[in-house]
Image (cartoon, grey):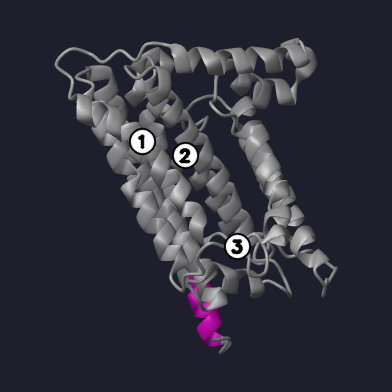
Amino acid sequence: MSMCWTSMLPLALAFIVLVPTPPSRSNRLWGDEALLAPPLQHAPGPLLLRLGVSDALKLFVKESIIPSHANAFLFYGAPSVALFLSLVSWAVISFGPGLHLADLSLGVLYLLALSSFGIYPVLIAGWSANNKYTFLGSIRSAAQMVSYEVVIGLIMLTAILLAGSFNLTTIIQAQQSIWYFIPLLPISLMFLISIIAETNRAPFDLVEAESELVSGFFTEHSSVPFVFFFLAEYASILMMSTLTATLFLGGYLTPFIEFHDATYFFFGSLMLGIKVCFILYVFILVRASFPRLRWDSLMHFCWAYSLPLALSLFTLTASILVAFEIF
C-alpha cells in the first residue's frame, strides 16, 4: 500500500500545483499567464502565493447569496454534482501496473458516460439561478459539450480499434512497441483540440465570455459553490490531460527503458506525471496564444470540419486494419 501511494506522488504534485484548492484569480494568474511570461506579468514571486491563500480563505468566509425566485436545492446541488462527476472519473485511471481503483473492462465507456452526465449540472446551475445570462451560458455549454463529445468518442474508438479493448490498462500495454501518438498524429492533435473545447478552455471558453455573459452559467454562484465549480473545471482539465497521455502517449510506459523491479511503480507514475504536465502546459500555451472564437465559428468548426474528419480517419484506420488483417 505504501508503494502505491509513493508512486502517485508525482501526479499528486501536478494536481496540487495546477489545480489549486480552492482556485482563485491570483492562483489562475500564477498558473496560467504568469507561468508563461513572468517578466511580462511582473509576478511578485512568493507574494503571489500568499495572495492565493488569502483569496482561498476569502472565498470560504464570504456569504453565499442566492438570487430571488431561484431554486435553492438545485442552485446549491449543481456545483456539488459537477465536482463529484469530475472526481469519480479517476477510478479507472491506471497510474502504474496494478495502480488503479477499478480496472473496469469497459473503462472507456465509463468515462464517456460520466462526461455525458457532466452536462446536467451545468444546465441545472444556469436554469436554477433565475438569470438570463446564466441560462444562456448553460445552453451554450450544453451545445458545446455535446458537439465535441461526439468527436472525442470517435477518436477514442480509433485508439480502441488498435488496442482491441475498452480497458485503459490494456490500451497502455498495447503501446509498448510504439505510442499511438506516432501513427495517429492527426487524430491525436484533433483529440487535443476537442478536449480543450470540451473543458471550456480558451480559445473555446464561450461559456464564460465575460464581455457577453458576465461569467457564464455560474455568474450568480459565490463562496463555496463558486469554488466547487472551479475545482470541477480544473479537475476535468487534469483528467482529460491524463486520458490523452493514456490513449496516445503510452500512459505510465517509459520509452526505451524497461523496469522489472519495484522501482517501476515509481518511475511509471513519474513518467505519467511528466506527460500530464506537458499536456497541461499546452493548455496554458493555447490559452495565452489564441483569441476567443465567435460562437458560430466554434460550432461550425466542430460540425463542418472536426466531425467529418474524425469520422473519415476512424473509417480509414478500420479499413487499414481489416485490409492488412491486423485484427
Q: Which residue sits at x=54%, y=25%? A: 23
- Identify the disc placed on residue 15: none
Relative to 51, say whether 310 is above or below.
below
Residues under labels 1 and 2: Cα distance? 17 Å
Q: Which residue is mark 3?
A: 94
Frontmost of labels 1 and 2 is 1
The kind of secondary structure element at disc 3 is loop
**Mark 3 or mark 1, which has the lower sequence index?**
1
What amino acid is at disc 3?
Ser
Q: Position of residue 29 (x, y in %)?
A: 63, 19
Image coordinates for residue 55, horizontal then vertical, percent: 56, 14
Q: Nearer the viewer, residue 83 or 257?
A: 83
Q: Horizontally, is 283 left or right of 205 in the view?
A: right
Q: Nearer the viewer, residue 107 or 247?
A: 107
In the rendered structure, which segment of residues is drawn in magenta? 316-323
Tell me which secondary structure the magenta stretch mostly adopts. Answer: helix
Amino acid on which disc 2 is placed: Thr
- The location of residue 11, given as percent across then percent down, is 68, 47
The residue under label 1 is 80
**Furthest residue in direction front, as rendered:** 1
Most distant residue in the bottom direction: 325
Q: Nearer the viewer, residue 307 or 164?
A: 164
